[in-house]
Amino acid sequence: MRILLLLFFINFSIALKVAAQLNAPKYANEFLAIGVGARAAGMANAQVAIVSDVTSGYWNPAGLLKQTNKFNGVLQHAEYFSGIAKYDYAAFSMLLDSVSALSFSIIRFGIDDIPDTRFLYDASGALNYDNIRFFSAADYGFFTSYARKLPIFGGLNVGGSFKIIYRKAGQFASGWGFGLDVGAQYELNNWKLGAMFRDVTGTFTAWSINSDSLISTYVQTGNVVPSTTLEVALPRLIMGVGRQFTFKKFGILPIFDLTITFDGKRNTLVRSSLASIDPTMGLEISYASIAFLRVGVKNYQELKNFDSSTYAVAEPTFGLGFRYRALSLDYALTSVGVQTESLYTHVFSLMVNLDKKDE
């Protein structure tokens, strides 16, 4: 155990050092920070300590061991920015035995039918709309997750997710990346504790750029034509705590998460050049484990007015859920614009539970 912890911190330190040398951007692979599942979206993505179904492969793979059925599947669809961007997610998980579980997940976030107007003018200088071409810019994440119960501390659940990232911007550029997430969950009485280290060794994405297709644009702007580049996502630590309360047929589950990033100062509640801390709070109220009401708040930011004065904003979330036998239908309403006008996003997910596990 000590050797594993030592290797973990060595890899983490190497990732930070290498990323610093590469001048890592703050928001690399940020599409993987959106979150999955309408239940989580309704609770402001506060999930690391309480997740207990197929979505654990994303939120915290250790939670796979808590699913109540041997097989669990989910589909999700959401649209952002008035339908311009599409976000889709699918996952499947299974309990291998009483101490281990496995899941597979895929995420796609993309914008389709983007007009390519480079050839809008023909050789004679006349407009020719038939020359407009279309392309897609999409990001993909593929997760393989494994969880196992350790015979220590009365049953500590741990897990990891190996992820492959593929990003493509039409014929202009594409990139492949690889990364590792590790997580743990522990339950004491009704208290639920969780921790998740995303990109624990750094997630490196190697980009290949089709310079020939962009040469004319770069020449006009005086920029250097790149052919390859390397992007790295730095580790982030998420810690959570929640507690289940039960009153007859009613259940109340408050949850609190802290997300700590190490890629420089961000616009969060606590920020410094070393790390930034972003708190998230969620609440789920249930009736007979059939109907669910969810609320949450996240994304605390400090914004500036035109007169340089500042004001604080936060993003509220709301959600509903309904479970009947093997099916669970969840809905969430989230806000992705907090400056002057909110752009609301509707998130839907459908979960199927099959073959109840042996007790």
Image (spheres, helix red, strand yellow):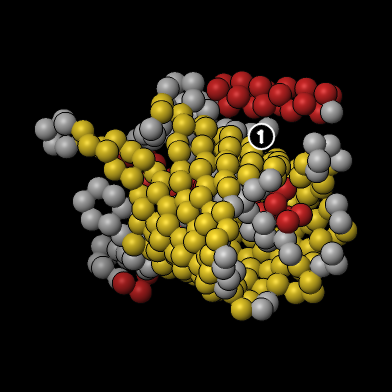
Q: Looking at the image, is 174 positioned above or below residue 10?
A: below
Does the image show residue 82? Answer: yes
- Is 255 placed left or right of 166 in the picture? left
**Residue 94 position by quadrant:** bottom right
Q: Residue at x 35, y 49 (%)?
A: 315
Picture coordinates of residue 53 (x, y %)? 67, 60
Picture coordinates of residue 347 (x, y %)? 46, 66
Query: Which residue was labeled with disc 1?
Result: 200
- Is 212 placed left or right of 357 in the picture? left
**Residue 119 position by quadrant:** bottom left
Q: Which residue lies furthest to the front in this view?
A: 248
Does the image show residue 139? Answer: no
Q: Looking at the image, is 283 positioned above or below residue 330?
A: above
The C terminus: image quadrant: bottom right
Q: Which of 341 and 126 is in front in this view?
A: 341
Q: Residue at x 77, y 41 (%)?
A: 156
Q: Which residue is drawn at 45% across and 36% down?
A: 278
- Is 136 placed left or right of 195 in the picture? left
- Is 156 placed left or right of 330 in the picture? right
Q: Which residue is drawn at 60% across and 24% down?
A: 16
Mark 1 closeness class: few <14, some 14–19, many ≥20 residues within 10 Å = many
Identify the element where label 1 is drawn. Answer: loop
**Residue 319 position by quadrant:** bottom left
The N terminus: image quadrant: top right
Amino acid carrying mark 1 in the image: Val
Picture coordinates of residue 308 (x, y %)? 16, 30
Q: Which of 355 and 171 is in front in this view?
A: 355
| Number of marks in picture | 1
Picture coordinates of residue 138 (x, y %)? 52, 58
